[in-house]
Image (cartoon, rainbow, N blue to C red):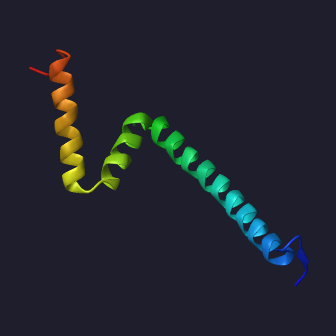
Amino acid sequence: MANVGGVAAERLRSFIERIERLEEEKAALAADIREVFSEAKSVGFDPKVMRRVIGLRRLESADREQQEALLETYMAALGMAPG
């Protein structure tokens, strides 16, 4: 393995090429996700709300409840509480 300035050139090239391939895959997946959101929007769903639901589903139940309680507190403090 060739060393240039103490760096294993082939090993470095391998890492860089792997990252580049993964970046290409990530871009393709992002395009696929945009397409699904566009399809959902075309049948009447709101993509912004869908993104929010997806974000909430990623959270643990306790974290989600804590965020919702804090949101309600902030809204009440600003006079925005429902009812």
Of all residues, the one furthest to the bottom in this rendering is 1
Q: Is residue 78 left or right of residue 3?
A: left
Q: Nearer the viewer, residue 59 or 57?
A: 59
In this rendering, position of residue 5 left or right of residue 52: right
Residue 25: percent from left, percent from top: 67, 61
Is residue 44 in sight in this rendering? no
Kindly give the residue lying farthest to the front in the view shown.
5
Pick the residue in front: 63 or 81: 63
Q: If the image is split into quadrants, where does the N terminus sit?
A: bottom right
Residue visible at 63% across and 48% down in the picture: 31
Name the residue: 36% across, 41% down: 52
Placement of 48 over or under 26, stated as above or below: above
Where is 69 relative to 7, above or below? Answer: above
Quick check: can you spot residue 51? yes
Quadrant assignment, res 13: bottom right
Q: How many labels sit on residues?
A: 0
Residue 41 rendering spot, x and y as whole percentages:
47, 36
Quick one: quadrant of the C terminus?
top left
Up the image or down, 9 lies above or below 19; here it is below
The residue that appears at 79% across and 71% down in the rendered structure is 12
Residue 49 pos. (x, y %): 37, 36
**Residue sitting nearer the eye, 67 or 57:** 67
Q: Residue furthest top?
A: 79
Where residue 79 sits, quadrant-wise, is top left
Q: Is residue 26 left or right of residue 38?
A: right
Q: Position of residue 23 (x, y in %)?
A: 69, 58
